[in-house]
Image: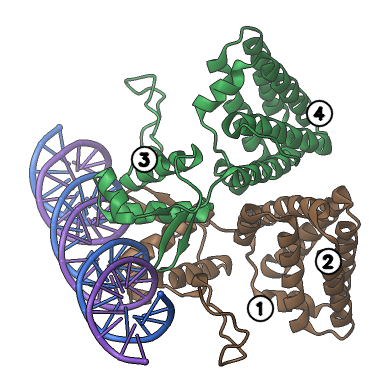
Chain colours: A brown, B green, C purple, D blue
Amino acid sequence: MIPEPTGSPRSEAFAKIDPKFQMTVRDHVHRTLRAAILAGRFATGEKVNERSLAEQFGVSTTPVKEALRQLETEGLVEALPRRGVIIRFDMSWAEEMILARAALESMIAHLAAKRIGKPAGAELTAIADLMAKATLSADADSLISLNEQFHEHIHRSSRCGYLAKLIERQQFYDASIRRVIHMDPAERQKALEEHTAIAKAIVTGDADLAERQMRNHVVRSGETYLNIVFGNKKDI
Amino acid sequence: MIPEPTGSPRSEAFAKIDPKFQMTVRDHVHRTLRAAILAGRFATGEKVNERSLAEQFGVSTTPVKEALRQLETEGLVEALPRRGVIIRFDMSWAEEMILARAALESMIAHLAAKRIGKPAGAELTAIADLMAKATLSADADSLISLNEQFHEHIHRSSRCGYLAKLIERQQFYDASIRRVIHMDPAERQKALEEHTAIAKAIVTGDADLAERQMRNHVVRSGETYLNIVFGNKKDI
DNA sequence: ATCTGAAGTCTGGTATATCAGATCCCACAC
DNA sequence: GTGTGGGATCTGATATACCAGACTTCAGAT
């Protein structure tokens, strides 16, 4: 047992580092390739060469293979046995990823509304309040961070580990794109209204309402993303 | 160019085999481990040893590592960098997998109701009719096969590649358990009613109804599965 | 000129070797 | 007895080697 911080020489003990944070080569390759695919830096159907990738990254093929296996399971590439892997990502794929996220987030919002406790509910409301302030002052960085906290808090409140993990994989626009989205005051305002409504529904335990609102929020903000990245429109 | 079948020596040309069907060692390891985990043959938190697994399968560690990477992305195991992988599956995980499938299948049913055409709709109705016949004659094998066709047909009608792929990964009870489920006449009857209602809602284009019914169907039949495998009950 | 197929090349799949972090164990100091 | 630390060992992470299936090319046959 590690001695309690109380009474130890240093009043500030060092926090244990989460093993998940350790970076491994295959993780780096995985993240980098994933980001590149989602940023549209590969054409759909494009064939990727393991040796070439390994050479570009300056590593052996082993971690590259593992990263490709992960991307395959994520559905971003397709592996034809003995033939190689090809990229599977375009606008329709992105649309479906948004729909998947909408389906899962709304399910988790439903459960969060049923399972959230008083203290956690107060915290969620507090986050929503901070979002209102950040929206007023147009603080994009805070908004991005708060947005993350907001959804993360709902995930925890739902007490769903698997679903939360699944959603993480549908999360495909990164901070830089979020920043672009938050540039638009109208979008900021709309997002705030939705977040506020979702928080209220969850805190008051209205599971069905929370579910509907979360779904609409994810789909609508997803469409905003699609318009920015692909510059197009589609019916859902 | 391959000559057209018309006028060729054989009136019946052989269908091109799908490269996906080819079996590779890592796929075998992946499927086998996956089935073993879902069948509860590992304890939650149990540590698995790559070398030991490779030895058991009589293969090297490379395909084992790749299979583990896939399982990790699926959320069935957790990899602690430099420390190894541990099993992540128990009843609560199974519950969440069912919820995930419910969320995704209902989304896809919604889209199918919007997008299905006349001929595909007729086919779906035909499958539902065959299910009614098979239910009457208690033909478990046909029911299992038809059930697969039914959902598969809905997936295709929704024209969603990514979502369909995602759902495949939540599909965790195999034919042997399905057979057990279909042993119960009451369960067969209930499933038939649900399938019939879903088919009707999709064919008539009532997207919201199709969505609700699909969700209830997946959750309810999932609970039946949980009761059989884990012998327990929980509120959703 | 077109088709066939055999040889050469490319590339993914698997096996093996090596490196280094994590864990375990025990001797030694207090 | 307790706790610290050095080293042995285990094991995952990476690199390398090798094999075999898939694709390409081109010569020879028709």
Disc number lying in front (2 or 3): 2
> Which amino acid is tagged 4?
Thr
- SS for callout 1: helix
Q: Chain of mark 2?
A: A
> Residue B26: x and y, percent?
35, 48
Quadrant position of the C terminus of chain B in the picture: top right
> Which amino acid is tagged 2?
Pro
Residue behind mark 2:
A119
Q: Are marks 2 and 3 in contact (CB under 8 Å)?
A: no
> Which amino acid is tagged 1?
Ser
Left or right position of A213 against B179: right
Q: Earlier in the sequence, mark 3 or mark 4?
A: 3
Residue at point 80% right, 85% down? Answer: A139
Q: Earlier in the sequence, mark 1 or mark 2?
A: 2
The span from disc 1 to disc 2 (Cα, nearest Å) is 33 Å
> Which amino acid is tagged 3?
Met
> Residue B232: x and y, percent?
65, 34
The span from disc 3 to disc 1 (Cα, nearest Å) is 47 Å
The span from disc 3 to disc 4 (Cα, nearest Å) is 42 Å
Between residue B200 and residue A202, name the one nearer to us. A202
Residue behind mark 3:
B1
The span from disc 4 to disc 1 (Cα, nearest Å) is 43 Å
Residue behind mark 1:
A176
Could one spot residue A191 in this view of the protein?
Answer: no
> How busy is the neighbourhood of tag 3: few (under 14 within 10 Å), some, or many (20 plus)?
few
Dot 3 and dot 1 within a common chain: no
Which residue lies most toward the top here?
Answer: B137
Could one spot residue B205 in this view of the protein?
Answer: yes
- SS for callout 4: loop
Disc number lying in front (2 or 4): 2
Q: Return the mark for residue B204.
A: 4
Vertical side of A135 occupied by B235: above or below: above
